[in-house]
Image: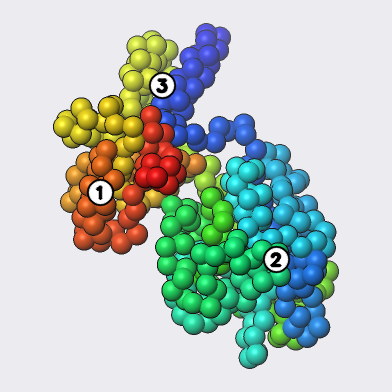
Amino acid sequence: MHKNCFYPLLVLLIGFTLTSFSGNDKITPVQEPFIVVLDAGHGGHDPGNLGNGFLEKNIALKIVLRVGEMLSKHKGIKVIYTRDDDTFVDLYKRGEIANKANANLFVSVHCDSHTSEAHGAGTFVLGLHANKQNFEIAKKENSSIYLEDNYESRYAAYNINSPESVIGLTIMQEEFLDQSIMLAKAMQDNFTGKLSRVDRKVKQAGFIVLHQTFMPSVLVETGFLTHKPEGTYLNSTKGQGEMGDAIANAILQYKKSISLNVSDQNSMMKQPEPEIVVAEKVVKEEPKVVEKPTVAPKVAPAVAKEAPKAEFVFKVQIMASSKDLGIASANFKGLNNISKEAFKNIYRYMYGSTSSYDYANTLRKDAEDKGYKGAYVVAYKNGSRINIKEAIK
Ligand SMILES: [Zn+2]
């Protein structure tokens, strides 16, 4: 009977643990909906590719609506469409919709085309095109911007004809790369498993629509309309239903593995208190749990003294991962002064801490020399991360 008395304590303890886990950054509380933004490629005056007379924009929309229908059956998932009818939506607006909704995932759905008999389904995450073929696919999808008003000023930073122009544009998505790849793999497993679609694998390329988002994001090329049998399949109710179900399944699997990761991390943090069911112990150890800083920036004393006076603090982000690593230098190729922060179910790892932007760039070069090629400088104000542009203007 007195077992019941433990529950309030347990709830309290878990509450404290979650609070200490979130640190300065927000981590999605359990009761918040898991928001999925579904993006049907093209639309309106942009038909997409017209292989064999099939319409990419219509097929993408029908698949996406099916995905949304399947996901909406699950409590705790909120679906947002960038378009749910035949309208044209600018590429930058698609990302904006996802960012404003603070979505957990962004999934863009397309169909491919080629002059050869190429066929199969592939899933892309943002990155450098590993080869000309990937570049050509991104170029085709990116050319939608030419159908937008004011595309010249809006996309001034992009030259879609240059494979190199995407360098530097991948930074925004870098910290979501692990999770984007995890989702992309789940997509491919579903396409190639039960559906036996030809596996065109998880690939990286410079898609503008993926560059706009600030969350794990993938672009699915469901198949080639130029390949008659595949185009016919994708244009059929059966094909659209099956591909829609496969994408929905992949999203559900991803969501499940993410929640498992989070509960793993929570249980890892509770490890020092395995006697959690003993009420007396729980009461005694509560303060310890509250004080335990999960996010513990190790700052050199000299810098720590300087930091409160400075308006901005600069660090070098060397990586982000769903893995919770210790901040010992041995885990970071010998780099000292590593700090860690939880952000949207991942961990960001930073090197150094300084009020000087110039010195931060020196630190970035150090990190690059150690092998962290994608390292970049990030800025903080009052302990919160801000846009680097605000700190250096
Ligand atoms: Zn497309």
| Closer mark to the observer between disc 3 and disc 2 | 2
The answer to which image quadrant residue 337 occupies is top left
Disc 2/disc 1 C-alpha distance (Å): 39 Å
Q: What separation in Å lies between label 1 and label 3 (alpha carbons)?
A: 48 Å
Q: Are marks 2 and 1 in contact (CB under 8 Å)?
A: no
Give the residue displayed 39% in from the left and 11% down from the top: 283
Quarter of the rendering occupied by the N terminus:
top right
Write down the residue under mark 1: 358
In the image, farthest residue toward the bottom: 116
Quadrant of the image containing the C terminus:
top left
Question: Can residue 385 be spotted in the picture?
Answer: yes
Q: How many residues crowd around disc 2 within 10 Å: few (fewer than 14), some, or many (20 or more)? A: some
Residue depicted at 47% across the width and 68% down the height: 166
Q: Position of residue 66 (x, y in %)?
A: 77, 58
Disc 1 crowd, CA 10 A, few/some/many (<14, 14-19, 20+): few
SS category of the residue bearing label 2? loop
- Tag 1: residue type? Asp
Q: Residue at x 18, y 51 (%)?
A: 334
- Relative to 188, residue 81 above or below: above
**What's the residue type where badge 3 is placed?**
Ile
For label 2, the residue is 148
Mark 2 near ligand 1 (CB under 8 Å)? no
Q: Which residue is mark 3?
A: 276
Residue 178 visible in the displayed image: no
Q: Is residue 363 left or right of residue 210?
A: left
Residue 276 screen position, x and y as percent = 41, 21
